[in-house]
Amino acid sequence: MEDQQNNSNSSLKIIIGVLALLLVGSLYYIYKISTEAEQVQTVLTTTVSEKESVMKDLQELKATYDAAIAENTSMSEELVKERDKVVKLMNDIDKSKGDVSKYKSEVSKLQNNMKALMAENDVLKKQNKTLTTQRDSTVVVLGEAKKYNEVLVGQNEDLSKTVEKGSKLSVLNMQTAAYKIRSSGKQIATDKAGRADILKISFTIAENQIAKSGDKEYYVQVIDSKSNVLGDKQTVNFGDKSLTYSFISKVKYENKTVNVTEDLPGKDFAKGTYFVNVFDKSELVSKTSFTLK
């Protein structure tokens, strides 16, 4: 009986020992698994943190390029190419699931490229600003020159008009009278229509030193009380204007005062008011009127 009890105690001790060993083994295994899990978690956390850091750097690079491209400088094409490289690398890193440290050298290279391009772009912007300032100054100068030229053109036109106006000859002191011619040839003034043989028309061309000298022609038009044009009754055209005249008075003008007298013969002159007009081509330069009883 005692031997049986001893055997039972021995078996129990063995079982307890085995269980103890199993417990220690289990604890060790659990510890090992936990340690490895923590290590994996640490690696994953580190990887995610590095990935986020790299992506942040690349996003800053892209933002810098976007801002520079928006300025529309002459380097826009180069900036777009570099920006596209950054975008491609961002896509590659986003798709990767492992270590991103292999991309760091490429990120560093892109950052260096960006610094060089931005420095060059800043120089170009400064040059453009200088050129813009110079251009604006040139535009202002040209604008002022244009205004000054317009003033000069206006003054020249005014001067030309003044000279043209001043060079026109003035026809003054126009007088008209009717005369009876006796058999002796003597002319006697009359205001009787029935006695008149000729109409004597006289006027003065004033002295003008800036006028063009030479032969001048004046068209004299005499209209009786019945609205008839006396004399030659010839019609001449000046562009879209026409003029029926009584005679042409030809004068040799040498910039000095000239007195002109012309006779218009006729018969059966009508009673009433007569109108006499003198034209320099189509321009009326003098007029008068008189009455025959």
Image: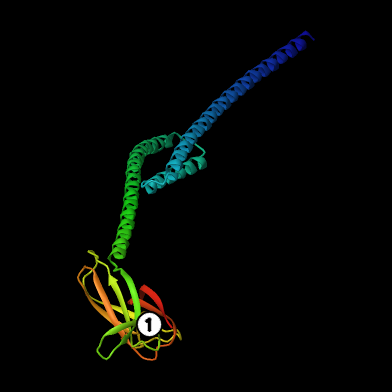
Residue at image point 34% right, 39% down: 126
Quadrant location of the N terminus in the rendered image:
top right
Above or below residue 17? Residue 93 is: below
Give the camera-side residue of 163 and 186: 186
Badge 1: residue crowd in 10 Å (few <14, some 14–19, many ≥20): many
Image x and y of residue 61, in percent: 44, 38
Above or below residue 102? Residue 169 is: below
Residue position marked by numbered label 1 in the rendering: 222
Report whether 18 appears left or right of 112.
right
Give the camera-side residue of 110 and 29: 110
Above or below residue 20? Residue 218 is: below
Image x and y of residue 32, in percent: 58, 23
Image x and y of residue 69, in percent: 43, 45
Give the camera-side residue of 140 and 91: 140
* Quadrant of residue 181 within the rendered picture: bottom left
Q: Of helix, strand and loop, which one carries label 1?
A: strand
- Looking at numbered disc 1 in the image, what kind of residue is underneath it? Val
* Quadrant of residue 89 within the rendered picture: top left
Report whether 288 appears left or right of 51.
left
Residue at image point 72% right, 15% down: 12
Residue at image point 35% right, 46% down: 140
The furthest residue to the top? 2
Image x and y of residue 229, in percent: 39, 86
Residue at image point 35% right, 79% down: 177
